Amino acid sequence: MVSVVPFIGRRRELAALTKRLDRVRQSSAGSAMAIRGRRQVGKSRLVQEFCDKAETPYLFFTATKGMSPVEAIEAFCAELKESCLPADPEQVVRVTSGSWPEAFRVLHSAIPPTPSIVVVDEMPWLAEQDDLFDGALQTAWDRLLAAKPVLLLLLGSDLHMMERLTAYDRPFYGRADTMALDPLDPAETAGALGLTGGDAIDAYLASGGLPGILRAWPHGTPPLEFIRQECEDPASPLFGVPESVLLAEFPAPDQARRVLEAVGSGDRTHAAVAATAGGREGPLQSGSLSPLLRRLTDEKRVLAMDEPLSVQPGKPALYRIRDHNLRMYLGVLRAAAEHSHRGRPDLAFGLVRRRWASLRGRAVEPIVRQALGMAAAAGELPWPDTEAVGGWWNRRFSPEVDLVGADRAPEARRVLFAGSIKWLDTPFDGHDLAMLRRGAVQVPGFDAEAGGLAVVSLSGVHPSVEGVDLVWGADDVVAAWG
C-alpha cells in the first residue's frame, strides 16, 4: 500500500516566508515576494502549507493559461469573494471590464486591517495576456496595497519572466524580495523516503527531488524496486511528471526540443548535439544551434553548461540536462514508459536495469561536485582555499578527471586537488588510483607534490589504496546537504 508522503523539508523557505509575515505584523505595512521555480517543484504546495500554518486570512488565486484579461479578472474577483479575506463577501464587486487597476482596487477594499496574505499563482500567465499587468500591479502596490498589512506572494514557473518582473528596467523593480525554489535536495529526499547511502542518491536521481514523484514512493522502498513497480503502471508519476514538464516547456517538436532530446540522449558537446539534432540536410548549423543552446541554458534553465576547471581556459564546454528526473526520463524512462504502455512492464524494467549503472555514473557527477563545493564553503575539506569544484577534460577526453578543486572558476589561480568518482558496485582500487594519478598531472596547474587527491566511491576504497587525502562515500554526499 502506498503511503502519502506528508509535507517534507523546506524549513528554510518556510522560515523566510514566516519572517516576512512577521515583518508585516510588526510594521502594519505591506511586503512582497516573487517565488520562481520550475513546474512540479512544489511552489504552490509550499505556499499553501505556509498559509495553512500562518492562521491568517488569505487569498490564493491561480491564473489559467490562455484566459483573457476579462475572464481572469472575473475569476480573480470570484476567488476573492469566496476567500476568508473580506469581512463581508457580498461587498466584493464583480469586475467585468477587464481592468486590472479596477480589480486591484476591489482587492484593496477587501483586505482587512489585520495581517493577511494574497497569493497570485502562475502570475506570468496574467502578464502574458495583458501587457499592462506589470504596470497596473506596480501602481496598485505603490498607491494602495503597500500601505496595508498584507504579504503579497507572486508565483511563477516561467523563470525568465519571473526574473524580469523584478529586473531594474521593469515596473516592479525594488518592490519585492525574490526566492528561487529548487527541487528537494538529496538529504530532504532521503529523509522523506527513509533511505540512506547509495539508495538515497539513486532515489534523488530518479525523482529529481520532485514532490509529485516522492508522494507516490512507498517509504523505505529501494529505487530499482520502486521503478520496477512503476513500470507496471503506465500512468505512474515517474513517467507522467517529466512528460508534463516537457510538454509544458516544449509543446511543439521544434529545433529546441530536438536539441534538448539530443543532450538527454547523451550528446554533450556542441558538435555532437549539432549532428543529432540536425536533419536530412546534415548537422544543425552553428548559427542556429548556438542561440538555442544559450536560450536553453540561460533563459529556460533546462540545460547546464560545464567548462573544464584549471589554470588555463579550456574547451570544449559540455552540456547536460539540469533537472535530474528529466535527465533520467530522456535517458531511459521515456523508452521504458513506451514498453509499459504496450503492456510489457518486464521489457520496461529490463531496459532500465541494463542502462541504470552507466546513466547514474554520469548523472551523479554534478551532485558530487556540488556536495564537495558545499563542504568547501563550510570549511570541511582539507583544502581551506577551495572556492570551486568542477572537472577537467581536453578535446580528446583523454584523460577526463572527475573532480578538480580550485581557488576560483572557470580559470583558476591554483588547483588544490584532483579526484575521481567511482559509482559502481566495486571499490576504488589500486588500478583506479593509478589512473587518477596519471590524469591529475595533466590538469594545468596541478602539482603532483603539493596537490591533494580525493576519491568519492559508492562501494568504498580497497584497503590497499594509500596516499588519498579525502575519501567520501554516498552518505557523505547526502550529509553535505544535512
Image: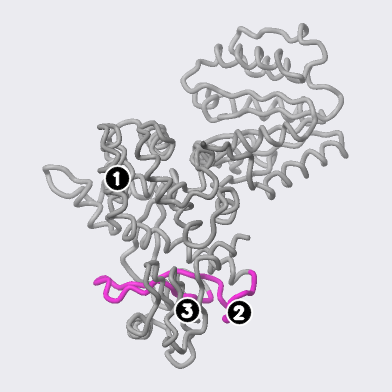
Tag shown at residue 448: none
In the rendered image, residue 313, in percent from the top left (x then y), is placed at 38, 72
In the rendered image, residue 166, in percent from the top left (x then y), is placed at 61, 40
Q: Residue at x 63, y 60 (%)?
A: 482
Separation of disc 1 and disc 3 at Cα? 33 Å
Q: Is 15 located above or below residue 462 in the figure?
A: above
Label 2 neighbour load within 10 Å: few <14, some 14-19, many 20+: few
Q: Residue at x 41, y 71 (%)?
A: 421
Q: Is 202 located above or below residue 79 in the figure?
A: below
Q: Amino acid at mark 1?
A: Glu
Q: Residue furthest left?
A: 280
Q: How many marks?
A: 3
Stretch in magenta = 378-407
Depth order, front residue of 179/247: 247
Does 101 lie within the magenta span? no
**Mark 3 residue element:** strand
Residue hosting label 1:
261
Residue hosting label 3:
454
**Mark 2 residue element:** loop
